[in-house]
Image (tube, rainbow, N blue to C red):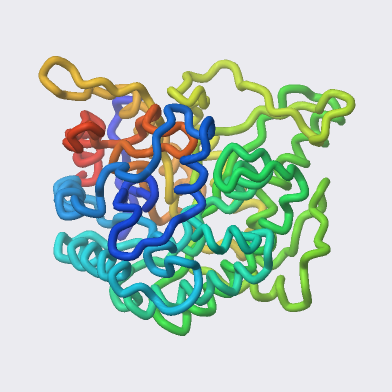
């Protein structure tokens, strides 16, 4: 880890932390909340590594005041949380559930009282199960349902939320939830999942319009990005890299910024109707960037159903997820966004950046996570380098405030600045929490 002090960041730079509803809230049947696709998926034997569910998670629903206190002590300027669609509309349709919105009312007010800006994500993968039963994101109607949900949520919270994020990582929800089936709802469609991409993006565009009618706060989307690292130098390797780049990085960015869909294998635009691309390209105020690691790519073996092969990247430290620790990838990604989209690129905020390690309390109950500190130090420096190169980066959010329920990995992976004992729900700030607090104060 570099010990040299970081240069100052621009005035007004937003420092924050992120979470998501299903990963921390628990209380999955409280106050009229309906089932989500993750409730269903987690109960399907063999889907979750440790057999757990998010039924309790971190019990944030009942302990939010304690967690807001942690945010206040951390000194961050913003907190990115997600609203659980099944709390607001238990079936994904109809009028809002007042008790569900009451929870977010309390949370938002507590954040503002603590001097922390609320940043609300509307969809972090927890689709109401009745909508999935009707076809989910494969069905065009879900995009319209999403816009209605956005309107209902903004009608209650639009006067106080400081930044709205429509979707979280639509690429990941498409690829893992509908391409490989390793996430909810568990569909394994490979490239037949393209309608999920289009309908999510259409839902985003319709939600932007709904939000603009309800609030003057800025609007964003949070995309997952992964720079391509070629594992070979042949024309076939370069073609494979371009195909992966089109799928992972450009499919959910080109149409947002008015370029339409990129050419590439499987990207059949047959589901696109007149006016859809205009709706998708509605101007946004911020592009959220979630970055964890680059992806190694080479040409696929003959007969592969995919136009690329993903390969491990050598020469990097690894996280507990076995992901390479590559801060240079974040710097290069931010520069690539600027170089690729130019004046069409809105200001960027890094809405997720973090790492999983096997954090174990010592005999005194403390968690000394030096690897996480090194990870964050490197990635914050990468952001600073990108700013120095002229990239308009205006914020950085750590994933995550708390150890939490990590999707298909259950409770086996810990990303938090705060350790959570899931048996007692005791919160213990780690060494990285103190490090980030000191950084923000400087």
Image coordinates of residue 394 in percent, x first then y, are 40, 56
The quadrant holding residue 90 is bottom left
- The residue drawn where x is 35% and y is 53% is 28
Query: Residue 187 sits in which quadrant?
Result: top right
Q: Spot the residue most to the bottom.
A: 213
Look at 25% across and 46% down and name the residue there. 59
Looking at the image, which is closer to me, 407 or 364? 407
Residue at the extreme right of the image, as rendered: 302
Compared to residue 252, the image places residue 188 above or below, namely above
Percent coordinates x, y for residue 191 in the rendering: 77, 46
* Left or right for 35, reference 416: right
Q: Where is residue 214 in the image (x, y as percent from the top left)?
A: 41, 82
| Residue 305 located left or right of residue 16 | right
Whether residue 349 is visible here, answered yes or no, is: yes
Taking depth in this image into account, of 438 and 3 the one nearest to the observer is 438
Nearer to me, 32 or 3 = 32
Rendered location of residue 429, percent (x, y): 19, 35
- Report the quarter where the N terminus lies: top left
Residue at left offset 43%, top offset 31%: 51
> Looking at the image, which residue is at 73% across and 45% down?
189
* Placement of 93 over or under 371, stated as above or below: below
Q: In this view, does 283 lie above or below 57?
A: below
């Amino acid at each position: 880890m570099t010990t040299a002090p970081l240069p100052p960041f621009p005035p007004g730079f937003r420092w924050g932390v992120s979470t998501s509803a299903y990963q921390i809230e628990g209380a999955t049947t409280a106050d009229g909340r309906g089932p989500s696709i993750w409730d269903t998926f987690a109960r399907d034997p063999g889907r979750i590594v440790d057999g757990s569910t998010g039924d309790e998670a971190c019990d944030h629903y009942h302990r939010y005041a304690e967690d807001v206190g942690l945010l206040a002590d951390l000194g961050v300027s913003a907190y990115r949380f997600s609203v659980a669609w099944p709390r607001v509309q238990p079936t994904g349709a109809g009028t809002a559930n007042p008790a569900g919105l009451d929870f977010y009312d309390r949370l938002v007010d507590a954040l503002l009282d603590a001097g922390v800006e609320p940043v609300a994500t509307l969809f972090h993968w927890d689709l109401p199960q009745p909508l999935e039963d009707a076809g989910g994101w494969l069905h065009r109607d879900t995009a319209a349902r999403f816009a209605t949900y956005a309107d209902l949520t903004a009608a209650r919270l639009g006067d106080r939320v400081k930044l709205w994020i429509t979707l979280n990582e639509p690429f990941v929800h498409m690829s893992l939830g509908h391409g490989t089936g390793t996430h909810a709802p568990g569909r394994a469609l490979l490239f037949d999942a393209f309608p999920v991409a289009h309908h999510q993006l259409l839902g985003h565009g319709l939600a932007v319009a709904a939000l603009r009618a309800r609030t003057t706060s800025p609007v964003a989307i949070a995309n997952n990005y992964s720079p391509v690292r070629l594992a070979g130098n042949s024309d076939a390797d370069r073609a494979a890299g371009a195909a992966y780049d089109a799928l992972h990085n450009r499919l959910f960015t080109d149409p947002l910024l008015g370029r339409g869909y990129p050419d590439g294998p499987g990207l059949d635009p047959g589901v696109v109707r007149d006016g859809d691309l205009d709706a998708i390209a509605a101007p946004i105020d911020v592009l959220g960037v979630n970055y964890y690691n680059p992806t190694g790519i080479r040409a696929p073996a003959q007969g592969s159903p995919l136009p690329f092969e993903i390969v491990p990247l050598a020469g990097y430290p690894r996280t507990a997820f076995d992901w390479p620790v590559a801060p240079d990838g974040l710097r290069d990604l931010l520069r690539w966004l600027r170089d690729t989209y130019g004046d069409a690129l809105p200001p960027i905020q890094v809405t997720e950046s973090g790492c999983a390690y096997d954090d174990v309390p010592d005999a005194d109950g403390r968690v000394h996570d030096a690897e996480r500190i090194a990870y964050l130090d490197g990635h914050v420096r990468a952001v600073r380098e990108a700013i120095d190169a002229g990239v308009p980066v205006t914020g950085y959010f750590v994933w995550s405030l708390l150890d939490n329920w990590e999707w298909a990995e259950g409770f086996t992976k810990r990303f938090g600045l705060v350790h959570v004992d899931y048996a007692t729900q005791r919160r213990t700030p780690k060494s990285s929490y103190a490090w980030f607090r000191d950084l923000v104060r400087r």
